[in-house]
Structures are given as C-alpha cells and as structure tokens.
Amino acid sequence: MRGQHVSMDLDLTKDVYPSRMDTDPQWLPRQDPVVYSEWSSESPIRKEQVEFYQKNGYLFLESFFAEEELQGYQEEARRLQESSRGLKADEIIREPGGDEVRSIFAVHRSQPVFRELSQHPRLLAIIEFLLGSSVYIHQSRINYKPGFTGKEFYWHSDFETWHVEDGMPRMRALSCSIALEDNYAFNGPLMVLPGSQHIFVPCIGQTPDDHYKESLRKQQYGVPDHKSLTEMVKRFGIDTPVGPAGSILLFDCNIMHGSNSNITPYPRSNIFMVYNSVENKVVQPYSGQNPRPEFIATRQGI
C-alpha cells in the first residue's frame, strides 16, 4: 500500500536542524521529504489528498471512525479521566495552576482499547504510505480540554522538541489527532500554519534539565520567538481544521501549530498518536542532555 519508496541514505547522527543554541534564530530549509511514497492507484488515499498534505502539511479526514467504533474510545477516555483525578503518576499531567487533568500519556501501552486503535489497519495504511515505511508509536496521549477551563497549547513545531530533547534525527514522523467530541472553531481546536512544515525555525535559549516536567503543563522553551511567528503567520496564514467527533487530523511533525483556551461550554478531547518511521529511530538527544522518560518518548522495544 505504500507505493514506491523515496530512497533515503542519511547519517542520522549528524545534527542538520540545530536549535536552542543562538539568540537570533536563523530559519533553515527542510532537508527531508514531506511524503515518502509515490502515489499510485493502489494508494490508500486519493492523489489530491496526497498533494494537499505535501503542500499544506496536514490532512483532515471527516468522520473517519464510525459511531460504534468511536463510542468505545469515548467511554474509555472518560473512564481514564475520572479514575485519574485523584491519582499521582508521571503519565498524568495537570493543568497549569490547577489539578484538572490536562493529558494522560502512554495510553497505547496502558490501555488495550488504545493499543488496538494505534494499530488500526485503515489508519496504518495511510500513515505508512505518507512515511514510506513501517512505523512505531513515538508518543501517545489523550489531551483533555474541558469546557470553560481547558487551557491553551502554545505555538510550536513538534519536531523541534522531539529532535532536541528526544533525539529524533529527521522529519519522518507525523501526528494523528482523533476527535472524541465535535471540534468547533470556538472550543479551542488545533490551528496550523499551512506550508510551514517546509521551514525549520530554531528556538532561542538552552533547555533546562528535566524541562519536560514543566513544559507538559506550560511550554516556555522550544517555542518560536514572536518575530518568527509573526512572519510565518503573514507568509502562511492560519487554518483551523474542524469537524464532527470521529474525524482525524494527520499533521506533519514540523508544521507550526497550537490551540487556544476553551472558554465555551463545549469540551474538546482528542487522542494523539505520534507515528515515527522505523528508519528514523531516536538517538541520543541533540541537546546533549538525558532523554525524556519512556512514557513521553519511546526508546525501548522498537
């Protein structure tokens, strides 16, 4: 189903996307493909969808999961949210300044329902086509954004963090966001800068040790400077892909994205599965620091 593979012969130990080193960021052109397979009539998505993903860095597939499939994911996510309220565990991330559950990590390992979801044949066929190889889960989580109190996720490129803090060598990964509730333009949906995946924006400031303990609640390092973000928005604009529960959003690892706080009564919870190519396994973090824990970035058994 992957089609013709885009050949890659790279030194994965070389840091071609340096970040958090300078006080004045210099934009770098992307050195990796966005789509790693050639389209054919046997490909799992249409040619125009491949072209859209190549150009814009994301693909929104409305109502990908049927209602009966989705119901099981919704029930398990609600059960986890309730059971996590009084628990203390590294995998459970709280909202900044409060005790509300913000995210639960490593759900594909701890919950059979989400383990099965991560290996969904129809979903995997599309992801393996886009990445041109077999894949594994680099990270999984449920993000909860309840009505009235759900906080924002600031603008960032996932790859910048995965590269610097996890040691992901190249841009050969993507995220799949599965909408557990209807996503509206007004309840804090994901916003993306279409086309920004073609540019790598280094971030300013060196990373503190164990930065993940604070960044998962509120990120201060690994986010673009205001000047760069302003220029990118002027160049690329902002898209807000929204749709009913059961829809999925696939987006490239380097696309700039973020989301607003949710001050409406309508909750917005999403399952995130991050897929990385087996040919792009993580090495030592390019920051030179200790890697983030296994529940955030898979290193074992891949």
Image: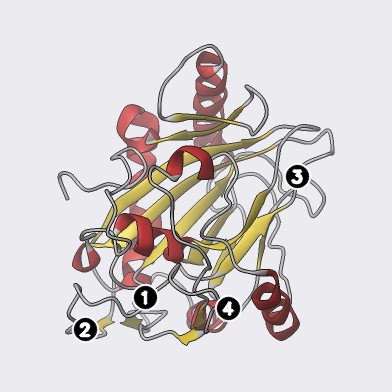
Image coloring type = secondary structure
The nearer-to-camera label among 1 and 2 is 2
Q: Secondary structure at mark 3?
A: loop
- The quadrant in which residue 230 appears is bottom right
Task: Residue under label 3, please give it.
Answer: 261
Looking at the rendered structure, the secondary structure element under dot 4 is: helix
Whichever of labels 3 and 1 marks the residue nearer the N terminus, that label is: 1
Residue found at x 79% / y 36%: 266
Residue sitting at 47 percent across and 61 percent down? 158
Q: CA distance from mark 3 to mark 1?
A: 37 Å
Q: Distance from label 1 to label 2 (Cα)?
A: 20 Å
Q: Is label 3 or label 1 in front?
A: 3
Residue 276 horizontal/vertical position (percent): 31, 60
Ranked by sequence position, the earlier of labels 1 and 4 is 1
1 and 2 marks in contact (CB < 8 Å): no
Residue of label 1: 43
* Kind of residue at badge 1: Ser
Residue 1 shown left or right of residue 92 in the figure? left
The part of the image, by quadrant, that contains residue 165 is bottom left
Report the Cα–Cα distance between label 1 and label 4.
Answer: 25 Å
Judged from this view, the residue extending furthest toward the front is 23
Kindly identify which residue carries mark 4: 196
- Find residue 53 and report its horizontal and vertical position in percent: 52, 76
First of labels 4, 3 by sequence position? 4
Q: Is residue 259 left or right of residue 12?
A: right
| Amino acid, disc 2 | Met
